[in-house]
Amino acid sequence: MTPKEKNILRKKIQRDIEALQKQIEILQKKTEPITPDCSLRRLTRMEAMAEQEVNQKILEKSKLRLTRLNNALLRIYKPSFSICIECEEEIGIERMKIRPESVRCVACAK
């Protein structure tokens, strides 16, 4: 991978990190406990709790991706960046543009 390609990926990673941080902040507010004395009807309260559970799962996945992106940013200029951890072949630039935190090529990810 060329230095120019790595620079493009670095910028993408930074943009993705910023977007995820904003998303996590919003999700944390949406996953705050619903108080029992909330003036919602029973069905509405149950719907709110179901929505809260969905938001919690999205929050967990977002935090995990944020960690992976931060790790990718730390190793972007290391020789092992964009090298598949299984087959040790270079991960294609198109895959890296979509998922810059990837550590496996498409074939090994399957």
Image: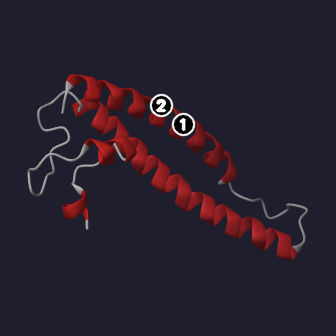
Q: Which of the 4 image quadrants contains residue 100?
A: top left
Q: Position of residue 18 (x, y in %)?
A: 51, 32
Residue drawn at (59%, 42%) of the image: 23
Residue 102 — which label? none
Residue drawn at (81%, 69%) of the image: 45
Decide which of 91, 72 is in the foreground and name it.
Answer: 91
Q: Which of the 4 image quadrants contains residue 2?
A: top left
Residue behind mark 2 = 15
Please give left or right for residue 101 compared with residue 49 in the image. Answer: left
Q: Position of residue 38 (x, y in %)?
A: 85, 60
Mark 2 in CB contact with mark 1 (< 8 angstroms): yes
> Which residue in the rendered view is the most extreme toward the left?
88
Q: Position of residue 12 (x, y in %)?
A: 41, 32
Residue behind mark 1 = 19
Total count of labels: 2
Report helix, strand or loop for mark 2.
Answer: helix
Between the C-alphas of marks 2 and 1, the distance is 6 Å
Report helix, strand or loop for mark 1.
Answer: helix
Q: Quadrant of the C terminus?
A: bottom left
Within 10 angstroms of label 1, few (less than 14), some, or many (20 or more) residues? few
Within 10 angstroms of label 2, few (less than 14), some, or many (20 or more) residues? few
| Residue 101 visible to the viewer | no
Amino acid type of the residue tagged 1 in the rendering:
Ala
Please give left or right for residue 8 compared with residue 47 in the image. Answer: left
Decide which of 59, 110 is in the foreground and name it.
Answer: 110
Give the vertical position of 93 relative to 31 (above or below).
Answer: above
Please give left or right for residue 100 compared with residue 62 in the image. Answer: left
Decide which of 68, 11 is in the foreground and name it.
Answer: 11
